[in-house]
Amino acid sequence: MPTTPMTTPDSAVAPDLPADGRSPVPAGAPEPAPFTHFPSGVLREALDGVPAPALAAFLDSWNDLPADEYLGTDRPYRFRRYGRFRLLDDGLEPLPHGTFLQDRAVNSLVGGVPRLFAPLHDAVAAGPALRAVVRAFRDRLPGPRHTVDTCGVHQIRVVALPDAEGDPAPEGIHQDGHSYVAQVLIRRDGVEGAQSRLYDLDRCEIHRALLTDPLESIVLDDRRVLHDVSPITSAPGAAIGVRDMLLVDFFASFDSTKEVAL
């Protein structure tokens, strides 16, 4: 499985950054690769110290996601919760719940529409599993992070039935409007499809992957690449197909386009 862009050698994986957020890459050196495709072992190691009951509760929380009411479809096929946090050296500080807002320039489907998703459960927001995941990715962002002090967390489930597919990215090829985005596979059961694809700013495909191993992930620089995911269908013989994802958006708190507090 590739772990870096198809056009970039393995050595281009972004190194851990020092506490001040400045990249250790010497002046004049090439930019880090705009994404990294991590095997599941990276998050498994990060979660190794999380008590088993807490980790089980974290993973089970995807079974209690309300329907996404903003798709405009007769049948709900996407379910989600959302929360946002200030990034601290020793953890996460929950921020007031608010609407999630993307610019029309990056989301042609629901851009400009303040979307109010159900909040994360308290046990998820305050739990050790989420802290461990966010810290692991914060230390592995594919570029400088000195302005990144806030994150948004999305729990998402997309389902498919034998007679109806589910679309993880109905907006098509797009950016999310953040600095960095981490995409984590939590569960894939009875599903076909869901190819994750990355593109350069000229919309030329630079990476394609099928996330199949729970906790396998892709972390991308949202300013330097676009992405999409192909629709899912239920596998032959499956009554329902389920694909659960955790998305973590990293951005600067002064960017007011991301959330509107209630």
Image: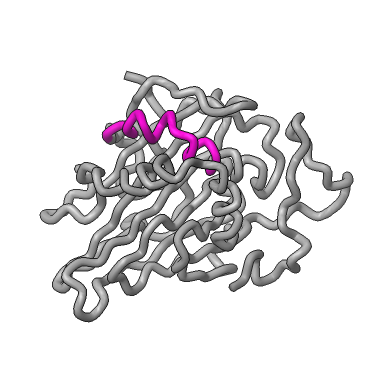
Is 122 in the magenta? yes
Determine whether, in the image, residue 72 is placed left or right of residue 120. left
Is 240 in the magenta? no
Q: Furthest residue to the left?
A: 74
- What residue sits 31% from the left and 19% below the top? 262
Please name whichever residue, 126 or 247, is drawn nearer the observer in this view of the structure. 126
Question: In this picture, is 85 found above or below 65?
Answer: above
Please name whichever residue, 54 or 228, is drawn nearer the observer in this view of the structure. 54
Instruction: Name the image quarter holding the N terminus.
Output: bottom right
Q: Residue 110: which quarter of the image?
A: top left
Residue 164 image position (x, y, % from top left): 17, 68
- What residue sits 76% from the left and 29% below the top? 20
Question: In this picture, is 27 found above or below 168?
Answer: above
- What residue sits 78% from the left and 62% below the top? 11
Instruction: Tell me the chief SS of the magenta region.
Output: helix
Residue 141 image position (x, y, % from top left): 64, 46
- Per the rendered image, the range of residues in magenta is 118-133
Residue 26 image position (x, y, % from top left): 88, 46
Determine whether, in the image, residue 153 is placed left or right of residue 237. right
Determine whether, in the image, residue 34 is placed left or right of residue 126. right
Residue 33 image position (x, y, % from top left): 70, 57
Q: Is residue 70 visible?
A: no
Please name whichever residue, 43 or 7, is drawn nearer the observer in this view of the structure. 43
